[in-house]
Amino acid sequence: QIAPSAFQSKCVVDDWWKGQSFAQEKKSFPVGWIALKKNPLKNSFGKEFSEQKKLLFSFEKLPEVSELVFFCVLFRLIRGEVLFENKSIRTLSESENDRIVVSSSCEGINFTGDMNIRASTWGITSIKRFF
């Protein structure tokens, strides 16, 4: 049994993200399959976003916040494991010119803005869509 609190944000700054456009959008994604790499891309940590994007193959994309969180929650519910445990993953989603970074741990999911800087703890993963 997993406590509902495991799926709540652990943001320490008054849930700043709740009013942001990425959290308010009611996006609908085309029907189809999405494959997510369950590990960060090798050598993606400690690079600026522009450098990280160069690590993607032409058929790979960065996940939106909603896609990444969906996979983290689903993986936790089905497998009982934390996807990207204690890692921070940059997404395609933006808030006030920052890329949104999703962190996942046994305590829950956290969001932060990347402030367009290089951080040794921020990596990327990729998705591939099949439509």
Image (cartoon, helix red, strand yellow):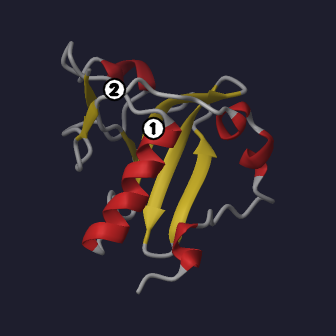
Amino acid beneath label 1:
Arg
Q: Which residue is mark 2?
A: 52
Mark 2 neighbour density, 10 Å: few (under 14) some (14–19) many (20 or more): many
Q: Residue furthest front?
A: 31
- Report how far apart the C-alphas of labels 2 and 1 lie in the structure: 9 Å
Q: Position of residue 20 (x, y in %)?
A: 75, 37
Q: Position of residue 27 (x, y in %)?
A: 58, 29
Res. 121 visible in picture = no
- Left or right: 94 with respect to 70? right
Res. 81 visible in picture = yes
Vertical position of residue 92 compared to residue 40: above or below: above
Residue in front for this viewpoint, 122 or 20: 20
- Identify the image quadrant of the N terminus: bottom left
Q: Secondary structure at mark 1?
A: strand
Give the number of the mark in front: 2 or 1. 1
What's the residue at 24%, 22% (across, down)?
60
Amino acid beneath label 2:
Gln
Tell me which numbered mark, 2 or 1, is placed earlier along the sequence: 2
The label on residue 124 is none
What's the residue at 54%, 31% (across, down)?
117
Disc 2 vs disc 1: Cβ atoms closer than 8 Å?
Answer: yes
Vertical position of residue 78 compared to residue 27: above or below: below
What's the residue at 43%, 68% (across, down)?
105
Vertical position of residue 18 compared to residue 116: above or below: below
The label on residue 90 is 1
Where on the picture, by quarter, is residue 56?
A: top left
